[in-house]
Amino acid sequence: MRNFPDGNSLRPVIPAHAGTQCRSYDGPGKSVDSGVRRNDEAGGLRPAEMPLSPYLASFNTQERPVRFAEKLAEQVLPKKATSEVILVGAGPGDPGLLTLHALRAIQDADVVFYDALVSAEVLALIGLDAEKVAVGKRAGAHSVAQVDIHQHLFAAARAGKRVVRLKGGDPLTFARGGEELEFLRAHGIAYRIVPGVTAAAACAAYAGIPLTHRDHAQSLQLLTAHSAQALDTLNWRALAAPGQTLAVYMGVAVAPTLVARLLAAGAAPTTPVAIIENGSRPEQRVILCALDQLPRRILSESVKAPALLLIGSVAALGGELAWFGQAPVDWLRLEPVQSLAVAA
C-alpha cells in the first residue's frame, strides 16, 4: 500500500465513482458531509455517484491522516491484480514519448524489471514504492540470462505483485517480448502489453528523416543485426533494392559485414546512411555518410550504442530537415567526391 504524506494527497488517486466527498476530505476530526447531492458542471444539483458514509462507518476518523488515507484507499480503489505481468514499452529515451498506459503501469507497479536501454528520465517516473530490478543486456555483455528473467517474472507474479517488464522502445520489436509472452502463457501467468514508440519511428523523427517519402522510399524494412549469424538469414538482394528504407537495429558492431553484404547484393556505394546515436535524448548525435564509408565513420566518430542505422535516400534529408539537438555531421556534403570516386 502506498504511503500518503497527508489526507489531501489522496485526492488524485480516488476514482470519480467514489464521489466528491472523497476528494474534499481534509484530515481527521473534520466534519464530512455524507449527503448525496453536489453541484455539477452545469450549475445544477444531481446525486453524487457514491456517498462517503459507507466507507467512513468502519473507520476511526481521529486516526493520523496517513493511516486514514491508507485505509480509505484500500476500500475505494480497485483491488490490485494478482499473478499479472505487464510488458511495457519505454520508448527510445525521451520520457515525453511514454504512453499514458505506460506511465500508469510503472507508477502502480510493485516491482519493475527494466532493460539497460531504458533512460534514467523514464526510470525516475517509476512509483516511489516500487522495487526496481535491472535485468538489462548489451551486445557482448549480457548481465542477466533470459531464462533468469523468466524466473524473476514468474516468482514476482506468483507472489501476487503487480509486475512490470519495462523495455526500451517497443516490447515486441527486437526486444524478446515474444519469448517472455510464450513463457508466461505456458506457466499460466496473466499478462498485458503496452506498446511503446519503437526506435525506428522515434529516431527518424527526431533526426528529421521521413521513413517513407513519395520521391525516395515506398517501403520500410526493420531488421536486426546484433550478430554476424543473424545476418545470414536475411534476403540481401531484396534489402539492396532501391526505393526503400532500411532501419537497422543493433547494427553498429557488425557494420563492416552489413556493408559488404549490401554492396555484394547490388546496393549503390553512394547510398545515404544516417547513424542516429541516443535518438530522442538530449545527447543525440546524427552522422550522415555514404554506405561505403559507414564502417570508417563509425570508428572516426566513436559511435556507441544505442544507435540506429537508416539506409536509403531518405537519410540524406536529415541534413536539411534536422530540428532537434546538435546539427548533424554531414559527410555526404563534406566528402561527396571521395564517395563518387569509390563508386566509379
Image (cartoon, rainbow, N blue to C red):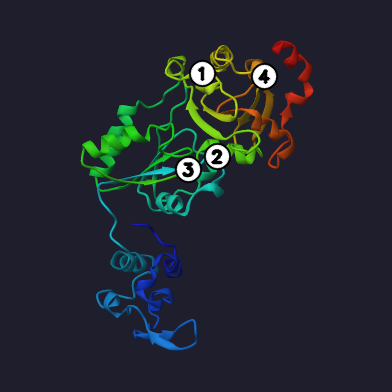
The residue that label 3 is drawn on is 90
Q: Which mark is residue 245?
A: none
- Asked whether, in this view, residue 91 is left or right of residue 145, the answer is right
The residue that label 2 is drawn on is 201
SS type, badge 4: helix
Instruction: Please name the amino acid that badge 2 sits on.
Output: Ala
Label 3 crowd bin: few (<14), some (14–19), many (20+), radius 10 Å: many
The residue that label 1 is drawn on is 237
Tell me which residue sits at (38%, 68%) in the image. Answer: 15
Instruction: Please name the amino acid that badge 4 sits on.
Output: Arg
Q: Gap in Å between the C-alphas at discs 3 and 4?
A: 29 Å
Q: Which image quarter holds the C terminus?
A: top right
The residue that label 4 is drawn on is 297
Vertical position of residue 327 compared to residue 227: above or below: below
Q: Gap in Å between the C-alphas at discs 1 and 4?
A: 25 Å
User: Viewer-nearest of labels 2 and 1?
Assistant: 1
- Res 265 → quadrant: top right
Residue 300 visible in image: yes
